[in-house]
Image (cartoon, helix red, strand yellow):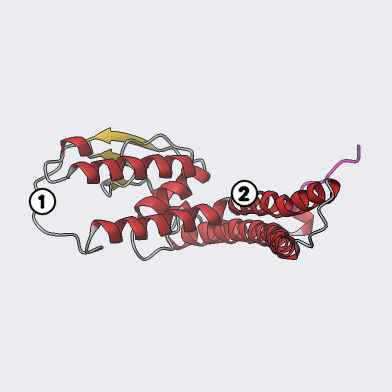
Amino acid sequence: VVIADRQVHLVEHFSGPKILLQKLGSRIVNKAAGTDLPDAASGFRAYSRDSLMLLNTITRFSYCMETIIQAGNKKLAITSIPVTTNPKTRESRLFKSTYQHVLKSAGAIIRAYIMYKPYVIFSAFAALFGVLGLIPFVRYAVLKAVGDDGNHLQSLLVGTVLLVMSFMSVIVGIIGDLLRTNRALIEDTLEHTKKMRFGLVDPASLAPLDVAERPAVSAA
């Protein structure tokens, strides 16, 4: 996969805040994908035929972020080359404002990241809620130790709710990881189907071997 670097600091119609947002977005995508691309939001790209067999876009907003995260998590070779851009001729048809673009791009990044590393997100939530949930109980124990006879029922209820949320985050993380495994198996099947459809694999060669034709396995 080759991604063109627009060198956003040289684009005339990009304002200062927009340049900063472009660079921030590239850093976030690189972090999620494990890549090092100077312009991850660039739509000027070239894909090899083999890479297209492995990539599957889900979002309806823009493929730019999602395909990088997919390619990074699938260990595809990604490189970047600097290019110059033409002057702006019209407004974007994908979004009406920079604010809308940021929101939709953030949603696409989070969705793509959760598809491949759900355990990271939900483990962080579980740890956060777990720590916050233990604080009221620790506080209650300390107050009891120093002789405070107050009930402190409200804080204990808050702590209980937070601990339940922590447990639920663990459960959702496990389910998400199972779905990630299932998605990987489905994508393997889809890749094979694509290759047969576009003539990269001969269906005749996929016929199961007869038992007599299979090589014998010697006992150790």
Q: Looking at the image, which is closer to me, 179 or 8?
A: 8
On whether residue 217 falls in the magenta region, the answer is yes
Residue 28 drawn at (x, y percent): 42, 43
The x and y percentages for residue 179 are 63, 61
User: Can the viewer see residue 106 in this picture?
Assistant: yes
* Image quadrant in which the C terminus is located: top right
The amino acid sitting under disc 1 is Lys
Q: Which residue lies furthest to the right in this view?
A: 220
Q: In this view, does 138 lie to the left or right of 127?
A: right
Residue beneath the point at 15% across and 42% down: 85
For marks 2 and 1, the one nearer the N-term is 1
Q: Which of marks 2 and 1 is in front?
A: 2
- Image quarter of the N terminus: top left
Distance of mark 2 from mark 1, alpha carbons? 42 Å
Q: Which one is nearer the viewer's eye here, 119 or 199?
A: 119
Question: What residue is disc 1 on?
Answer: 88
Q: Position of residue 115 (x, y in %)?
A: 54, 57
Q: What element carries label 1?
A: loop
* Residue in view at x 51 percent, y 62 percent: 193
Task: Kindly identify the amino acid type of the residue bearing the numbered disc 2.
Answer: Ala
In this image, 220 relative to 171: left or right?
right
User: CB atoms at circles 2 and 1 under 8 Å apart?
Assistant: no
**Residue 200 in sight from this viewpoint:** no
The range drawn in magenta is 214-220
Whether 210 is drawn above or below 48: the answer is below
Bin the neighbour count of mark 2 within 10 Å (Cα to Cα): few under 14, some 14-19, many 20 and up: some
Residue 124 badge: 2
Q: Residue 148 carries which label?
A: none
Q: Compare residues 100 and 87 and report the one nearer the observer.
A: 100
